[in-house]
Structures are given as C-alpha cells and as structure tokens.
Image (cartoon, rainbow, N blue to C red):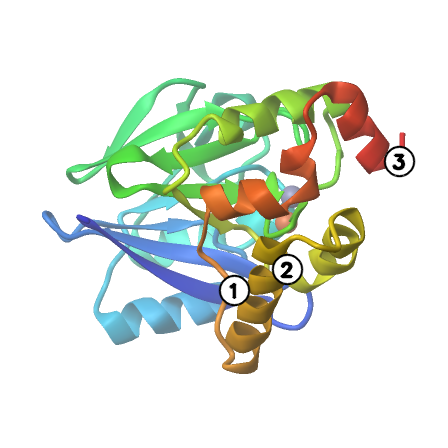
Amino acid sequence: MSLDIETILCRAGAMDNYSYLLTDSASGISAIIDPSEAAPIIKRCDNLGRKPSYILNTHHHFDHTDANLEIKNYFQAKVIGAEADKRRIPGIDETLKDGETWFLGKSKAEIIQVDGHTIGHILWYFPDDKALFTGDTLFNLCIGGLFEGTSKDMFTSLSKIKNLPDDTLFYPGHEYTIHGIPFALNYSPNNPELQNYIQLTQQRLNQGLPVGPISLGIEKQCNPYLKAQNLSEFENLLGQ
Ligand code: ZN
Ligand code: FE
C-alpha cells in the first residue's frame, strides 16, 4: 500500500460528509477528496503536517465542493474534477474524463464516470491501492438519490462498481449506514453477512469511528441496490 488514507468527518451531525486526505507515501504528495467544510480539514492536515497539493471532486454538489476555494487558497492546491462539471465546480483548474488516468505522486487513479446522482459524477479509483472513492453514488447499504440521471443511468453505474474486484475498499461521501439498515434488513432479513455488517456498524459508531471502509465483496452481498440483477428489479427497489 503506497496510499495513506485519512477519513475526515465534516458537517458533523448535519449532513455527515466525509472528506478524505490521501497521501502518496513514495512522494509525500497529498490530496483532499470533496472538501465540504474547511475547519476540520485544515485542522487534520496541520496536525499531520500535510499540505495537500490537490483537491479532487467527485461531483459538483455544494456539500462536496463548498470548501474548495478556502482549501485551495490555504494550501495553494489545484482543483480537479470531471470535464462535465467544469462550469459548476468552484475553483476548478483541471478536468478529467471517463477512463482517464491521473497520478497522485506514484499512486495511480482511474476515473470512472457514474451518471445517476448527477450527470458527470466520477469515482476516483486507485486500483493498485484497492481504494475506491464513491462520492454520492454508493453509500454503505444504500445509494445516492437520482438528482440528474435516470434509474437506467444509475443501474449502469452500479454495474461498473460491481465489476471491480471484491477486495476493493470503498470510501463513501457520507456516513449514511444507519439510514440504509432498515431497508437492507427488510430486503434480506436472514442474511448472516448483513447481520455481521450491522454489528460492525454499531461497534464502529459507538466508538465514534466511521463505519467504512467496507470491501465491495461484502457490500455486494448486503446492499440491496447492488444485488438487483436487472433494471426492472432495480427500479422495483427504487419504488418506480
Ligand atoms: Zn451529491
Ligand atoms: Fe452529498
């Protein structure tokens, strides 16, 4: 593992966003994913002596980009986001498209476009580090709402996630696990993997820790929206 990942809770108790501080250990170069609130991010970076060179956005929504300009100015960082969001991400300097590769020092990221929550939402996937930043597309036991895309877009996007290796750990944009539990339990009340997941959720939240990261292998067994085999099953889950 050459990528160090720190989870930073932002907008705590309100929207419970997660920003992530990534550091490529080979070069010491850092980046912040989705800076939603400046104070907790600056505090953590200063404590760790890190000075992020980049801000990486998953999508344009304000609760993922609100602190872009403040973090950009404080650390003299460059903002990178999707080409599709180039007119709606504050402070954007560089854009990337689906399938493109980007390097944080020596750590390779692949851009995967996942329309649905928004059109042009991207995943930041670090294949060698088995880390996937899912923004508001995939949460623990649930998924993001369809603000701009269709159910078909979202189903296609989730299929892209399902095709990634099971041992990939995913890092969501919000701590929403607790909201996903009732529906997941109702969907498969006798799933032992889900029982373990719920136990782990309670343990971690009781300790004040993020529930994630969880492996895609476990998520595929427990998240109803990843279990849907076809579009009509998926639309049934969405209540459409
Ligand atoms: Zn969003
Ligand atoms: Fe969000």
Circle 2: element type: helix
Q: Left or right of 24: which side holds 181?
A: right
Task: Identify the mark nearer the N-term, 1 or 3.
Answer: 1
> Which amino acid type corresponds to the residue marked 1 in the rendered image?
Val
Dot 2 corresponds to which residue? Answer: 177
Check the image and name the residue furthest to the left: 26
Cβ of mark 2 under 8 Å from ligand 2: the answer is: no
Taking depth in this image into account, of 66 and 194 the one nearest to the observer is 194
- Residue drawn at x 53%, y 41% is 90
Dot 3 corresponds to which residue? Answer: 239
Residue 22 screen position, x and y as percent: 30, 52
Circle 1: element type: loop
Residue 228 screen position, x and y as percent: 70, 30
Instruction: Report ligand 1 position as a quadrant.
Output: top right
> Which amino acid type corresponds to the residue marked 3 in the rendered image?
Gly
Residue 205 screen position, x and y as percent: 56, 75
- Residue drawn at x 63%, y 36% is 226
Tell me, for residue 211, which label it has, or none: 1
Residue 132 screen position, x and y as percent: 41, 41
Residue 198 drawn above or below residue 202: above
Task: Identify the mark nearer the N-term, 2 or 1.
Answer: 2
Cβ of mark 3 under 8 Å from ligand 1: the answer is: no
Task: Identify the mark nearer the N-term, 2 or 3.
Answer: 2
Distance from the alpha carbon under mark 2 to that under mark 1: 7 Å
Q: Toward which corner of the image does residue 99 lie, by quadrant?
A: top left
Check the image and name the residue furthest to the bottom: 207
Taking depth in this image into account, of 231 and 196 the one nearest to the observer is 196
